[in-house]
Image: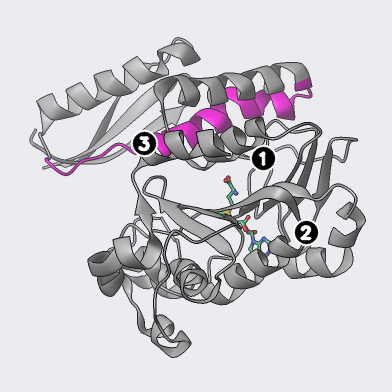
Amino acid sequence: MEIKGIKGVFVYGDKVLIKCETSGGETSFSIPIINFPYFAYIIQEAKEKIKELNPLPNLKIQDEISLLNIYLTYAIPHKISGDERTFRRKMREIFEFQKNQGFINRVIVVQSILDKLSKPRTYLEIGVERGYTFYQIQAEKKIAVDPEFKIPGGFKNTESEIFFQVTSDEFFEKYAEDFRENPFDVVLVDGLHTFEQSIKDVENALKFLSPRGVIVMHDCLPKNYPSSLKSLEDAVKHPEFDGSWSGDVYKTIIYLRAKRKDLFVAVVDSDHGVGIIRYGEPENMIDIEESEIEQIDFFELMKRKEELLNIKPPDWFKTWIETL
Ligand SMILES: C[S@@+](CC[C@H](N)C(=O)[O-])C[C@H]1O[C@@H](n2cnc3c(N)ncnc32)[C@H](O)[C@@H]1O
Protein backbone atom coordinates (compact mmCIF):
# COMPACT_ATOMS: atom_id res chain seq x y z
CA MET A 1 0.00 0.00 0.00
CA GLU A 2 1.46 3.32 -1.05
CA ILE A 3 0.80 6.40 1.10
CA LYS A 4 0.06 9.27 -1.28
CA GLY A 5 -0.66 12.05 1.15
CA ILE A 6 -1.87 13.09 4.57
CA LYS A 7 -5.49 14.17 4.72
CA GLY A 8 -5.44 15.45 8.25
CA VAL A 9 -4.42 15.15 11.86
CA PHE A 10 -7.30 15.26 14.32
CA VAL A 11 -7.75 14.87 18.03
CA TYR A 12 -10.63 12.49 18.71
CA GLY A 13 -11.50 11.65 22.29
CA ASP A 14 -8.35 10.15 23.74
CA LYS A 15 -6.54 9.70 20.43
CA VAL A 16 -4.66 11.67 17.80
CA LEU A 17 -5.94 10.30 14.52
CA ILE A 18 -3.89 10.62 11.34
CA LYS A 19 -5.78 10.12 8.09
CA CYS A 20 -3.77 9.14 5.02
CA GLU A 21 -4.66 8.89 1.36
CA THR A 22 -3.33 5.67 -0.13
CA SER A 23 -3.16 4.07 -3.56
CA GLY A 24 -6.13 1.92 -2.51
CA GLY A 25 -8.24 4.68 -0.93
CA GLU A 26 -7.87 5.89 2.62
CA THR A 27 -6.36 4.62 5.84
CA SER A 28 -5.82 6.01 9.29
CA PHE A 29 -3.82 5.26 12.40
CA SER A 30 -3.99 6.70 15.87
CA ILE A 31 -1.74 7.53 18.80
CA PRO A 32 -3.34 7.68 22.25
CA ILE A 33 -3.42 10.85 24.27
CA ILE A 34 -2.72 9.86 27.84
CA ASN A 35 -3.53 13.25 29.22
CA PHE A 36 -3.32 16.82 28.14
CA PRO A 37 0.20 17.87 29.25
CA TYR A 38 1.59 15.24 26.86
CA PHE A 39 -0.24 16.76 23.94
CA ALA A 40 2.80 18.62 22.59
CA TYR A 41 4.89 15.48 22.53
CA ILE A 42 2.12 13.53 20.85
CA ILE A 43 1.82 16.10 18.10
CA GLN A 44 5.61 15.98 17.74
CA GLU A 45 5.42 12.19 17.53
CA ALA A 46 2.68 12.47 14.92
CA LYS A 47 4.81 14.85 12.88
CA GLU A 48 7.74 12.43 13.00
CA LYS A 49 5.48 9.57 11.99
CA ILE A 50 4.15 11.54 9.04
CA LYS A 51 7.68 12.35 7.91
CA GLU A 52 8.50 8.65 8.04
CA LEU A 53 5.45 7.71 6.01
CA ASN A 54 5.51 10.43 3.45
CA PRO A 55 7.80 13.43 3.77
CA LEU A 56 5.53 16.09 2.34
CA PRO A 57 7.60 19.27 2.51
CA ASN A 58 4.64 21.61 2.84
CA LEU A 59 2.67 19.71 5.42
CA LYS A 60 1.96 21.84 8.45
CA ILE A 61 -0.06 20.53 11.33
CA GLN A 62 -2.22 23.37 12.51
CA ASP A 63 -1.67 23.55 16.24
CA GLU A 64 -4.57 25.98 16.48
CA ILE A 65 -7.04 23.53 14.96
CA SER A 66 -5.71 20.81 17.22
CA LEU A 67 -6.24 23.12 20.19
CA LEU A 68 -9.84 23.64 19.14
CA ASN A 69 -10.23 19.87 19.00
CA ILE A 70 -8.65 19.60 22.45
CA TYR A 71 -11.20 22.13 23.72
CA LEU A 72 -14.07 20.16 22.23
CA THR A 73 -12.89 16.77 23.45
CA TYR A 74 -10.99 17.50 26.67
CA ALA A 75 -12.96 20.32 28.30
CA ILE A 76 -16.41 20.57 26.71
CA PRO A 77 -17.73 17.14 27.86
CA HIS A 78 -17.44 18.41 31.47
CA LYS A 79 -19.41 21.53 30.61
CA ILE A 80 -22.13 19.44 28.98
CA SER A 81 -22.31 17.11 31.97
CA GLY A 82 -22.68 20.11 34.31
CA ASP A 83 -19.27 19.72 36.00
CA GLU A 84 -18.43 23.41 35.81
CA ARG A 85 -15.37 23.18 38.10
CA THR A 86 -13.58 20.58 35.96
CA PHE A 87 -14.53 22.46 32.79
CA ARG A 88 -12.97 25.68 34.14
CA ARG A 89 -9.86 23.85 35.37
CA LYS A 90 -9.32 22.24 31.98
CA MET A 91 -9.82 25.56 30.17
CA ARG A 92 -7.11 26.97 32.43
CA GLU A 93 -4.81 24.06 31.50
CA ILE A 94 -5.40 24.68 27.79
CA PHE A 95 -4.49 28.33 28.28
CA GLU A 96 -1.40 27.56 30.41
CA PHE A 97 -0.25 25.05 27.82
CA GLN A 98 -0.20 27.71 25.09
CA LYS A 99 1.50 30.20 27.39
CA ASN A 100 4.21 27.72 28.39
CA GLN A 101 4.79 26.82 24.76
CA GLY A 102 5.35 30.52 23.97
CA PHE A 103 2.47 30.64 21.47
CA ILE A 104 1.41 34.10 20.33
CA ASN A 105 -2.20 33.91 19.17
CA ARG A 106 -5.44 35.83 19.80
CA VAL A 107 -6.02 34.17 23.18
CA ILE A 108 -2.53 34.95 24.46
CA VAL A 109 -2.64 38.49 23.04
CA VAL A 110 -6.01 39.29 24.68
CA GLN A 111 -5.06 37.82 28.07
CA SER A 112 -1.60 39.42 28.12
CA ILE A 113 -3.18 42.84 27.56
CA LEU A 114 -5.83 42.26 30.24
CA ASP A 115 -3.10 41.16 32.67
CA LYS A 116 -1.41 44.55 32.23
CA LEU A 117 -4.55 46.48 33.20
CA SER A 118 -5.80 47.16 36.69
CA LYS A 119 -8.78 45.25 38.06
CA PRO A 120 -11.73 45.10 37.64
CA ARG A 121 -11.36 44.54 33.91
CA THR A 122 -14.11 44.29 31.29
CA TYR A 123 -13.72 42.11 28.19
CA LEU A 124 -16.02 42.18 25.16
CA GLU A 125 -15.89 39.48 22.48
CA ILE A 126 -17.73 40.11 19.20
CA GLY A 127 -18.24 36.76 17.45
CA VAL A 128 -17.91 33.98 20.02
CA GLU A 129 -18.97 30.87 18.12
CA ARG A 130 -18.15 27.82 20.30
CA GLY A 131 -16.64 29.86 23.15
CA TYR A 132 -13.12 28.53 22.54
CA THR A 133 -11.53 31.93 23.26
CA PHE A 134 -14.24 33.33 25.53
CA TYR A 135 -13.97 30.58 28.15
CA GLN A 136 -10.17 30.78 28.28
CA ILE A 137 -10.10 34.50 29.01
CA GLN A 138 -9.93 35.62 32.64
CA ALA A 139 -11.50 39.00 33.45
CA GLU A 140 -13.83 40.28 36.15
CA LYS A 141 -16.57 40.97 33.59
CA LYS A 142 -16.87 39.26 30.20
CA ILE A 143 -19.46 40.09 27.57
CA ALA A 144 -20.21 37.76 24.67
CA VAL A 145 -21.98 38.95 21.50
CA ASP A 146 -23.04 36.62 18.69
CA PRO A 147 -26.33 36.38 16.76
CA GLU A 148 -25.88 32.60 16.71
CA PHE A 149 -23.85 31.13 19.56
CA LYS A 150 -22.60 27.61 18.91
CA ILE A 151 -21.50 26.83 22.45
CA PRO A 152 -21.84 23.10 23.14
CA GLY A 153 -24.07 22.64 26.18
CA GLY A 154 -25.40 26.21 25.89
CA PHE A 155 -24.62 29.27 28.00
CA LYS A 156 -25.99 31.09 31.00
CA ASN A 157 -25.68 34.64 32.28
CA THR A 158 -23.85 35.12 35.58
CA GLU A 159 -22.47 38.14 37.45
CA SER A 160 -19.24 37.91 35.48
CA GLU A 161 -20.33 36.43 32.12
CA ILE A 162 -23.09 38.06 30.09
CA PHE A 163 -24.30 36.76 26.73
CA PHE A 164 -26.09 38.84 24.10
CA GLN A 165 -27.53 36.77 21.27
CA VAL A 166 -27.69 39.68 18.82
CA THR A 167 -25.56 41.12 16.02
CA SER A 168 -22.76 43.49 16.99
CA ASP A 169 -24.71 46.39 15.44
CA GLU A 170 -27.69 45.67 17.66
CA PHE A 171 -25.46 45.26 20.71
CA PHE A 172 -23.82 48.67 20.22
CA GLU A 173 -27.12 50.32 19.43
CA LYS A 174 -29.14 48.93 22.34
CA TYR A 175 -26.91 47.56 25.10
CA ALA A 176 -23.36 48.97 25.01
CA GLU A 177 -24.47 52.17 26.77
CA ASP A 178 -25.19 50.08 29.89
CA PHE A 179 -21.44 49.48 30.19
CA ARG A 180 -20.50 53.18 30.05
CA GLU A 181 -19.55 53.05 33.75
CA ASN A 182 -17.18 50.11 33.13
CA PRO A 183 -15.91 50.68 29.60
CA PHE A 184 -14.29 47.82 27.72
CA ASP A 185 -10.61 47.19 28.43
CA VAL A 186 -10.16 44.72 25.61
CA VAL A 187 -12.52 44.12 22.69
CA LEU A 188 -11.91 41.11 20.46
CA VAL A 189 -13.42 41.83 17.02
CA ASP A 190 -14.02 38.41 15.47
CA GLY A 191 -17.59 38.54 14.12
CA LEU A 192 -18.59 38.85 10.47
CA HIS A 193 -15.34 38.83 8.45
CA THR A 194 -16.05 41.61 5.97
CA PHE A 195 -14.50 45.05 5.55
CA GLU A 196 -17.90 46.76 5.97
CA GLN A 197 -18.76 44.99 9.22
CA SER A 198 -15.31 44.91 10.81
CA ILE A 199 -14.78 48.66 10.32
CA LYS A 200 -18.19 49.29 11.94
CA ASP A 201 -17.26 46.98 14.83
CA VAL A 202 -13.94 48.78 15.38
CA GLU A 203 -15.50 52.26 15.18
CA ASN A 204 -18.27 51.27 17.58
CA ALA A 205 -15.82 49.59 19.97
CA LEU A 206 -13.67 52.75 20.02
CA LYS A 207 -16.67 54.68 21.43
CA PHE A 208 -16.86 52.37 24.45
CA LEU A 209 -13.16 51.66 25.01
CA SER A 210 -11.51 52.48 28.34
CA PRO A 211 -8.68 55.06 28.15
CA ARG A 212 -5.96 52.38 28.21
CA GLY A 213 -8.12 49.91 26.29
CA VAL A 214 -7.08 47.89 23.25
CA ILE A 215 -9.03 46.42 20.34
CA VAL A 216 -7.71 43.07 19.14
CA MET A 217 -8.97 42.08 15.70
CA HIS A 218 -8.64 38.53 14.43
CA ASP A 219 -8.14 37.50 10.75
CA CYS A 220 -6.18 40.52 9.53
CA LEU A 221 -3.81 38.39 7.41
CA PRO A 222 -5.60 35.79 5.25
CA LYS A 223 -3.43 32.77 4.60
CA ASN A 224 -4.45 32.14 0.98
CA TYR A 225 -6.60 33.53 -1.83
CA PRO A 226 -9.90 31.74 -1.09
CA SER A 227 -9.61 32.72 2.58
CA SER A 228 -9.36 36.40 1.57
CA LEU A 229 -12.58 36.50 -0.47
CA LYS A 230 -15.27 38.93 0.57
CA SER A 231 -18.01 36.34 0.67
CA LEU A 232 -17.86 33.03 2.51
CA GLU A 233 -20.02 31.50 -0.24
CA ASP A 234 -17.41 32.33 -2.90
CA ALA A 235 -14.60 31.12 -0.63
CA VAL A 236 -16.29 27.75 -0.07
CA LYS A 237 -16.85 27.26 -3.82
CA HIS A 238 -13.16 27.83 -4.59
CA PRO A 239 -11.28 24.56 -5.33
CA GLU A 240 -8.43 25.55 -2.98
CA PHE A 241 -10.67 26.43 -0.04
CA ASP A 242 -9.21 24.72 3.05
CA GLY A 243 -11.79 25.64 5.67
CA SER A 244 -10.27 28.95 6.72
CA TRP A 245 -12.13 32.20 5.96
CA SER A 246 -10.63 35.54 7.00
CA GLY A 247 -12.62 37.58 4.47
CA ASP A 248 -11.46 41.11 3.66
CA VAL A 249 -11.00 42.23 7.27
CA TYR A 250 -7.45 43.27 6.22
CA LYS A 251 -8.99 46.28 4.44
CA THR A 252 -10.11 47.65 7.81
CA ILE A 253 -6.48 47.73 8.95
CA ILE A 254 -5.46 49.46 5.71
CA TYR A 255 -8.31 51.96 6.13
CA LEU A 256 -7.34 52.79 9.72
CA ARG A 257 -3.69 53.17 8.73
CA ALA A 258 -4.70 55.61 6.01
CA LYS A 259 -7.33 57.64 7.87
CA ARG A 260 -6.83 57.63 11.62
CA LYS A 261 -4.10 59.92 12.95
CA ASP A 262 -5.26 59.15 16.50
CA LEU A 263 -4.71 55.37 16.44
CA PHE A 264 -1.77 53.04 16.83
CA VAL A 265 -2.36 50.10 14.45
CA ALA A 266 -0.25 46.98 13.89
CA VAL A 267 -0.78 43.32 12.96
CA VAL A 268 1.04 40.43 14.62
CA ASP A 269 2.03 37.85 12.02
CA SER A 270 0.50 34.76 13.61
CA ASP A 271 -2.90 33.05 13.99
CA HIS A 272 -4.25 34.51 10.69
CA GLY A 273 -3.07 38.01 11.67
CA VAL A 274 -3.87 39.47 15.08
CA GLY A 275 -4.57 43.20 14.73
CA ILE A 276 -3.84 45.60 17.59
CA ILE A 277 -5.65 48.95 17.64
CA ARG A 278 -5.55 51.55 20.39
CA TYR A 279 -5.68 55.30 20.89
CA GLY A 280 -2.19 56.76 20.47
CA GLU A 281 0.25 57.94 17.86
CA PRO A 282 0.47 55.86 14.70
CA GLU A 283 3.94 54.40 14.08
CA ASN A 284 3.52 55.61 10.50
CA MET A 285 0.62 56.15 8.12
CA ILE A 286 -0.08 55.25 4.50
CA ASP A 287 -1.30 57.41 1.67
CA ILE A 288 -4.10 55.58 -0.09
CA GLU A 289 -7.57 56.57 -1.31
CA GLU A 290 -10.66 54.78 -0.01
CA SER A 291 -11.58 53.68 -3.55
CA GLU A 292 -8.13 52.06 -3.93
CA ILE A 293 -8.50 50.05 -0.72
CA GLU A 294 -11.47 48.13 -2.16
CA GLN A 295 -9.24 47.06 -5.10
CA ILE A 296 -6.48 45.50 -2.98
CA ASP A 297 -6.74 41.75 -3.38
CA PHE A 298 -4.81 38.94 -1.69
CA PHE A 299 -1.90 39.03 -4.16
CA GLU A 300 -1.42 42.78 -3.84
CA LEU A 301 -1.66 42.43 -0.07
CA MET A 302 1.07 39.78 -0.02
CA LYS A 303 3.39 42.04 -2.03
CA ARG A 304 2.83 45.04 0.23
CA LYS A 305 1.80 43.56 3.58
CA GLU A 306 4.56 45.24 5.64
CA GLU A 307 3.58 48.68 4.37
CA LEU A 308 -0.20 48.16 4.30
CA LEU A 309 -0.68 46.33 7.58
CA ASN A 310 2.35 47.34 9.68
CA ILE A 311 3.10 43.65 10.13
CA LYS A 312 5.11 42.64 13.20
CA PRO A 313 6.78 39.31 13.98
CA PRO A 314 5.29 37.39 16.94
CA ASP A 315 8.27 38.27 19.18
CA TRP A 316 7.50 41.97 18.72
CA PHE A 317 4.39 41.45 20.84
CA LYS A 318 6.49 40.32 23.81
CA THR A 319 8.34 43.66 23.77
CA TRP A 320 5.30 45.79 22.94
CA ILE A 321 3.26 44.41 25.82
CA GLU A 322 5.90 45.70 28.25
CA THR A 323 5.19 49.26 27.06
CA LEU A 324 1.51 49.11 28.09
C1 LIG B 1 -14.82 33.03 13.62
S1 LIG B 1 -16.18 32.87 14.65
C2 LIG B 1 -15.62 33.51 16.19
C3 LIG B 1 -14.54 32.69 16.85
C4 LIG B 1 -14.25 33.03 18.30
N1 LIG B 1 -13.98 34.44 18.50
C5 LIG B 1 -13.06 32.25 18.82
O1 LIG B 1 -11.98 32.82 18.99
O2 LIG B 1 -13.22 31.05 19.05
C6 LIG B 1 -17.25 34.09 14.04
C7 LIG B 1 -18.58 34.22 14.76
O3 LIG B 1 -19.12 35.51 14.43
C8 LIG B 1 -20.51 35.42 14.45
N2 LIG B 1 -21.11 36.54 13.71
C9 LIG B 1 -21.52 36.58 12.43
N3 LIG B 1 -22.06 37.77 12.14
C10 LIG B 1 -21.98 38.52 13.27
C11 LIG B 1 -22.39 39.83 13.62
N4 LIG B 1 -22.98 40.64 12.74
N5 LIG B 1 -22.16 40.26 14.89
C12 LIG B 1 -21.55 39.46 15.79
N6 LIG B 1 -21.15 38.20 15.51
C13 LIG B 1 -21.36 37.74 14.27
C14 LIG B 1 -20.82 34.06 13.86
O4 LIG B 1 -22.10 33.61 14.29
C15 LIG B 1 -19.65 33.22 14.39
O5 LIG B 1 -20.06 32.47 15.51
Disc 1 residue type (three-letter):
Phe
State the image quarter where residue 295 is shown: bottom left
Asked if ligand 1 lies within 8 A of label 1, the reply is yes
| Residue 17 is one of the magenta-drawn residues | no
Rendered-image quadrant of the N terminus:
top left
User: Sequence order check: which comes first, mark 3 or mark 2?
Assistant: 2
Mark 1 and mark 2 residues within 8 Å of each other at the beta carbon: no
Q: Which mark is residue 208?
A: 2
Pick whichever of labels 1 and 2 is earlier in the sequence: 1
The quarter of the rendered structure image containing the C terminus is top right
Structural distance between the alpha carbons of marks 3 and 1: 24 Å
Q: Residue furthest bottom?
A: 291
Residue linked to disc 1: 134
The quadrant holding residue 81 is top right
Name the image colouring.
Answer: one colour
**Quarter of the render that holds ligand 1:** bottom right
Q: Which residue is mark 3?
A: 315
> Does residue 136 sit above or below 25 in this rendering?
above
As helix, strand or loop, the secondary structure at mark 1 comes to: loop
- Badge 3 vs badge 2, beta-carbon distance below 8 Å: no
Highlighted magenta segment, given as a residue range = 57-84
